[in-house]
Amino acid sequence: SFSIGSGGALYPSTLGNKNLRPEVSREVELGVDVELMNKYGLTVTHANNVINDQLLPVTPPAASGFQTQWQNAGELTNKTWEVSLNIPIIQKRDLSYSVRFNYDATTSMITRLDMPETFYSANAQQGSETMFKIKQGEPFGSIWGRVFIKSCSQLPADFQSRCGNGKDFVKNQDGFIVYVGEGNTVRDGITKNLWFTRVPAASAPWAGGTTKDNLQWGAPILYRDSTGAVPLMNIGNALPDFHWSFSQNLTFKKFTVYALLDATVGKSIWNEQRQWSLGDFQVSEVDQKGKDIGDVKPLGYYFRAASTGGIGGLYDILAPNNNTVEDASFVKLRELSIGYRIGKIPGVGGDWNVSFIGRNLKTWTNYRGYDPEVGVGGGDLGSGALNAIDAFTFPNLRQITFSIGTSF
């Protein structure tokens, strides 16, 4: 295919491929259904799914003049476990109560990739260009980004002995390893006028790296490799480790109550709106009001003139990092409904009932955004479930519904 540019010029875009084959999906599924005492039900299912000859956009040789070509270039292996347990606890004429528990876990591995490892972006979302890595032997949905040091073991070997309580490098209130110098603590920045005083690059970890950056007092330090460059590292996955749900049904005479809790565990999401707000000084943690003088941090801790060497504060040139790629595990009160059967109304007839239904009523999570259950659509991966980015995304709404109905 070709695209038309300014002046009507044609530009090569996608190179054709007469050797394309359909993707082939093979699945083996095994299941067991068990009923105990004609009462308790247990279902266990295991599925192994292999998608071969995946259609992927591959960069062809430059001599072709085209930007991309669709090829059969990959294999994805998915393994899934599902467990369902149904327990009727009370079964009487005017009272019944039952609970149901569901669990599922899926792992997706890229088991073959006939092209160089590459990154896919999320709908041209700024900062996502090097976020989602496709690499043979890696889990699908891997999130890559820069890493601020949080452990002494991440420093170069010759600096690790200088890291720890009472030493040159210590862990600050936010969990980052920072330089304070011998005889100082993380609380001395303002009282001793130490913030952003500099240690020459030659005396800094990795000798300032490839960009020869000076070491700055109190500032978070980006991890570097043996060459001094700031590498991209695997810092999370858009796909969760597992889901579970727990539902309850209660019927008492003319009343019915249903409640559903569900959870997602082990999922990561890039809180881009929080990272952007670090640069605009709009996020709550930038507000120093009410903090003790030893805990106060200057604006430069959150945002400074950035460089590829990583001296841009936690804003970090709006690139995914281990400060803003967060654990998005959550538990939600997904649904709560209460119903009452009125029955026949004199002079009207019918069998009347009323109900109140609430959805997304409460979320329990350590995620610092509005809603951990968000993502952006489109892009190379084409799915909000895979594009794990919270980019000022509208959260799921809490809904409360009243209904009245009848049958004749």
Image (cartoon, helix red, strand yellow):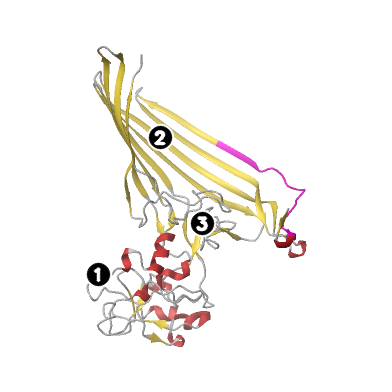
Q: Is residue 10 visible?
A: no
Classed neighbour count for the residue bearing mark 3: other residues with Cα under 10 Å, few (<14), some (14–19), many (≥20): many
Q: Closest to the observer: 148 or 380?
A: 380
Query: Looking at the rendering, in which quadrant would you find the C terminus?
Result: top left
Residue drawn at (47%, 80%), measured in percent from left and top? 206
Nearer-N-terminus badge (2/1): 2
Q: Which residue is mark 3?
A: 142
Q: Quadrant of residue 290?
A: bottom left
Nearer-N-terminus badge (2/3): 2
Q: Position of residue 223 (x, y in %)?
A: 46, 73
Q: Which residues are magenta?
A: 8-28
Classed neighbour count for the residue bearing mark 1: other residues with Cα under 10 Å, few (<14), some (14–19), many (≥20): few
Whether 172 is drawn above or below 67: the answer is below
Mark 3 to mark 1 CA distance (whole Å): 38 Å
Amino acid, disc 2? Ser
Q: Which residue is mark 1?
A: 289
